[in-house]
Amino acid sequence: MIADTLNKDASDIRLRLTVTPPPDRTRLIRTVTAVVIVGPVIGCIAAAALAIRYGVSAAAIAGFIVAYVLTTLGVTLGYHRHFAHRSFRTSRAMQAIFIVLGASALQGSLLYWVSTHRRHHQFSDTADDPHSPHNRGGQSLGPFDGFWHGHIAWMFSRDVTNAMRFAPDILRDPFVFALQSRYGLWALIGLALPAAIGGLWSGTAYGALEMFLWSGPVRLLGVHHASWAVGSISHLYGRRPFATGDHSANNFWVAVFAFGEGLQNNHHAFPRAARHAFRWWEPDLSGLVIAGLERARLIWDVNRPTPEQLTAARRDNTLAKPA
């Protein structure tokens, strides 16, 4: 009798779209979210003030670029294309690299990210989409309110996407689950390591501070808003060559800064495609890196739609040669 009740409760939980943490947990989540959003802005102001007074070293610029590229790829290749959509297979070592780099982007743990993203795809631009710029819990949104909700405000929702329903594979994988559970550690290392390198390289405390600011807050400000623009701008403005049943659009500039993720219409038409670019001129740096990793045999079983599938799905039923 007790076992039947427990099994029924577990089954009910698995069917829910969201779960509601206790009030103290909700306050903690919202506080951390606010710090992650506001902290990079404050750090960027500090970096700008120091740059105006003392200039910016080449090492700091290099640190910013390297950190931006690595952490963005951790999200696009790891969190998104590998774990959320299983667009390719890879080794445990590469999975560990993806998890650590993705955590360094400070966008939440792998479990949280994958759960939220899969829910977004299943209910794209409907009342149950966690971050649609068109719909908030059944309420239609205008362009400004929609952008604000899809870009930032949705992260302060009281409810959290139910991982038992949307990411059971992450929960069942002991290796992946254990690594992603150390999200806070990887995030701290991602901030501290560049600062340590900057200090050792320059031999000064100022060098450590400068590297921390440019590889930490300044980099995070860019990575965050490029990623958040995928859910806001790329569901508001851009080209829609495929009929997807939602508002996903290909936005060129979001795709540039988010390494291909801004090609949302392509992606929503073919969610498991490892490359989001289907034309030669569509920017998808993540797709190019995937091609390189495949040639190096670091990933395999890469998913690609056929030319016939692309042709059939296009609105105008025409297709240039795929990239």
Image: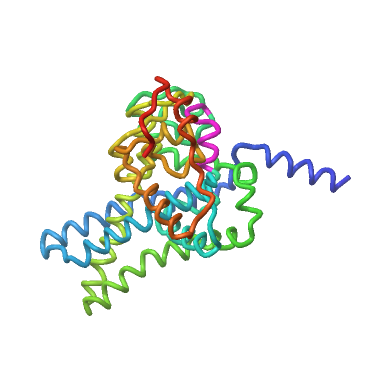
- Residue 163 in the image: state x and y as whole percent: 60, 46
Residue 25 appears in the figure: no
Vertical arrangement, residue 199 with respect to residue 100, above or below: below
- Residue 178 in the image: state x and y as whole percent: 59, 62
- Residue 8 in the image: state x and y as whole percent: 78, 41
Residue 265 appears in the figure: yes
Quadrant in which residue 39 is drawn: bottom left
Quadrant in which residue 142 is drawn: top left
- Name the residue rendered at 79%, 45% in the picture: 7
- Name the residue rendered at 44%, 60% in the picture: 296
- Between 247 and 308, the one lying in front of the other is 308
Give the tally of numbered discs: 0
Quadrant, the N terminus: top right
- Name the residue rendered at 22%, 79% in the picture: 203
> In the drawing, does residue 49 fall left or right of residue 162?
left
- Between 316 and 263, the one lying in front of the other is 316
- Residue 104 in the image: state x and y as whole percent: 41, 59
Task: Give the farthest residue toward the top.
Answer: 316
The residue segment tinted magenta is 116-127
Colour pattern:
rainbow
Whether residue 39 is in magenta: the answer is no
Quadrant in which residue 18 is drawn: top right
- Between 55 and 118, the one lying in front of the other is 118
> In the drawing, does residue 16 fall left or right of residue 253?
right
Quadrant, the C terminus: top left
- Name the residue rendered at 51%, 35% in the picture: 121
